[in-house]
């Protein structure tokens, strides 16, 4: 007896009505893409489930990959046996015995896909449950919250039997909600924002601002490594490195200290929006949390957002820092994020930034800059790195930006 198939259940996809098929097809594609090392698996789907035929692939390895695929509510390894009731009884007893059942509770949950089968679900639940009670001492039935749940699906030619259910990542399949660009720093918040964007089905590209010699090669590498961490949830990500030294030096020279951060963020947003347009993305995501720092007050957001009409989505806006940290630990970005390599937002940070900047003043101070020339020169020198889930610092593929347009 061998587990030969994994049954995948949907969460929100079940509510998508006429669009459900498109979501399921994308989820099936993402499942295949998440495990290229298991090229023998076959992914099939119908209106209610996705089935993965293992064909000898390592079940534990496949399970671990599935846990990070957005769009999956839960999944179960299943046994496929002939539609023989006596055989089903024997298999169920063996499976329950393997789960150290002494002192535990159980439930039989049957489902008839083939309604022509001679026994209904109530009869099957009672018959199979009685067999387990007779065969295994010190076990009891519990309908609401059993320790062991045995699922039996009655198909036209087979029984599907499963005893284990694993929680999926939830959310929507990546790629079903369009494309967005994420302003990715080296801090704690923006990788979490990237993860949450992926969870809502957004295909993302990462935009990172780099200011050598003020920011170090280690700071740039840290941002790439954080991006690599996030790829585990959505596949390959284009990492777009923006040269920002000239812009920051110009701001430092021409803008009063209190408005340095406001004008800097305005220029960052202008560049990010220009990249978004070139990359055919629909929205900008960032890691701003309301009130966390001076540039994240509502007054600051108004003064900064003034430069674009593009939707700016802030997945962590209403979270406190501890909530964000907990997610970063869950997705394994926290330890990288706290490495002491400064990004370009901190190296020129004023000692007393305006927490309630006035829009008119921000516009006026920005007018002292050659905004168009600074933007054009930065856009002409973008560097793109294609970061895959197996990305390492020794294996990089850097591409000229113009080659990807």
Image (tube, helix red, strand yellow):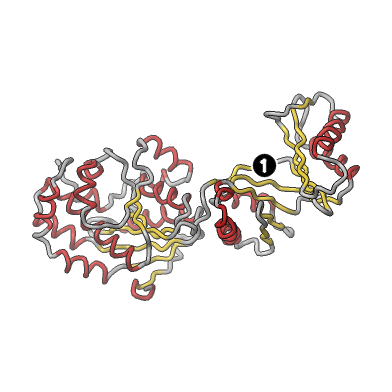
Residue 50: quadrant of the picture: bottom right
- What is the quadrant of the C terminus in the image? bottom left
Total tally of numbered discs in the picture: 1
Q: Is residue 300 visible?
A: yes
**Of the pair 394 and 37, the residue shown nearer to us:** 37
Q: Is residue 196 above or below residue 105?
A: below
Considering every residue shown, the one lying at the far right of the view is 86
The residue at 13%/51% (across/down) is 362
Estimate the x, y position of residue 348 in percent, counting from the top left.
18, 50
Estimate the x, y position of residue 216 in percent, counting from the top left.
28, 56
Estimate the x, y position of residue 318 in percent, counting from the top left.
35, 38
Residue 148: quadrant of the picture: top right
Left or right, residue 215 beside residue 166: left
**Of the pair 120 and 184, the residue shown nearer to us:** 120
Left or right, residue 380 beside residue 98: left
The residue at 48%/54% (across/down) is 201
Q: Residues within 10 Å of mark 1 (few under 14, many from 20)?
A: some
Q: Is residue 179 above or below residue 399?
A: above
Estimate the x, y position of residue 193 in percent, counting from the top left.
39, 48
Q: Report the residue marked by disc 1.
A: 165
Q: Secondary structure at mark 1?
A: loop
The residue at 41%/43% (across/down) is 334
**Of the pair 390 and 232, the residue shown nearer to us:** 232
Considering every residue shown, the one lying at the far bottom of the view is 403
Q: Is residue 35 visible?
A: no
């Amino acid at each position: 007896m061998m587990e030969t198939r994994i049954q995948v259940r949907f969460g929100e996809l079940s509510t998508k009505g006429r669009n459900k098929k498109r979501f399921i097809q994308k989820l099936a594609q993402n499942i295949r893409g998440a495990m290229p090392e298991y090229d023998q698996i076959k992914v099939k789907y119908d209106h209610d489930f996705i089935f993965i035929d293992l064909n000898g692939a390592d079940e534990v390895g496949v399970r671990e990959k599935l846990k990070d695929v957005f769009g999956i509510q839960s999944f179960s390894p299943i046994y496929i046996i002939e539609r023989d009731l006596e055989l089903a009884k024997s298999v169920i007893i063996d499976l329950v015995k393997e789960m150290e059942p002494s002192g535990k509770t159980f439930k039989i949950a049957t489902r008839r896909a083939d309604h022509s089968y001679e026994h209904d679900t109530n009869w099957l639940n009672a018959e199979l449950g009685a067999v387990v009670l007779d065969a295994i001492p010190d076990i009891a039935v519990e309908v609401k919250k059993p320790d062991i749940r045995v699922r039996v699906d009655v198909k036209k030619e087979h029984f599907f039997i499963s005893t284990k259910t694993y929680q999926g990542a939830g959310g929507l399949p990546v790629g079903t909600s369009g494309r967005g660009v994420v302003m990715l720093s080296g801090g704690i918040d923006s990788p979490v924002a990237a993860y949450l964007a992926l969870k809502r089905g957004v295909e993302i590209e990462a935009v990172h601002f780099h200011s050598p010699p003020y920011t170090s090669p280690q700071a740039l590498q840290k941002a790439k490594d954080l991006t690599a961490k996030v790829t585990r949830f959505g596949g390959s990500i284009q990492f777009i490195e923006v040269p920002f030294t000239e812009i920051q030096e110009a701001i430092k020279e021409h803008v009063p200290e209190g408005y340095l951060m406001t004008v800097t963020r305005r220029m960052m947003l202008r560049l990010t929006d220009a990249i978004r347009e070139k990359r055919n993305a629909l929205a900008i995501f960032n890691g701003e949390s309301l009130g966390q720092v001076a540039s994240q007050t509502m007054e600051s957001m108004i003064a900064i957002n003034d430069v674009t009409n593009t939707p700016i989505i802030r997945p962590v806006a209403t979270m406190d820092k501890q909530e964000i940290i907990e997610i970063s630990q869950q997705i394994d970005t926290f330890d990288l994020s706290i490495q002491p390599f400064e990004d370009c937002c901190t190296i020129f940070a004023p000692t007393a930034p305006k927490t309630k900047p006035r829009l008119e003043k921000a516009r006026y101070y920005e007018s002292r800059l050659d905004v168009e020339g600074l933007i054009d020169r930065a856009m002409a020198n973008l560097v793109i790195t294609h970061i895959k889930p197996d990305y390492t610092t020794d294996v990089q593929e850097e591409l000229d930006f113009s080659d990807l347009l």
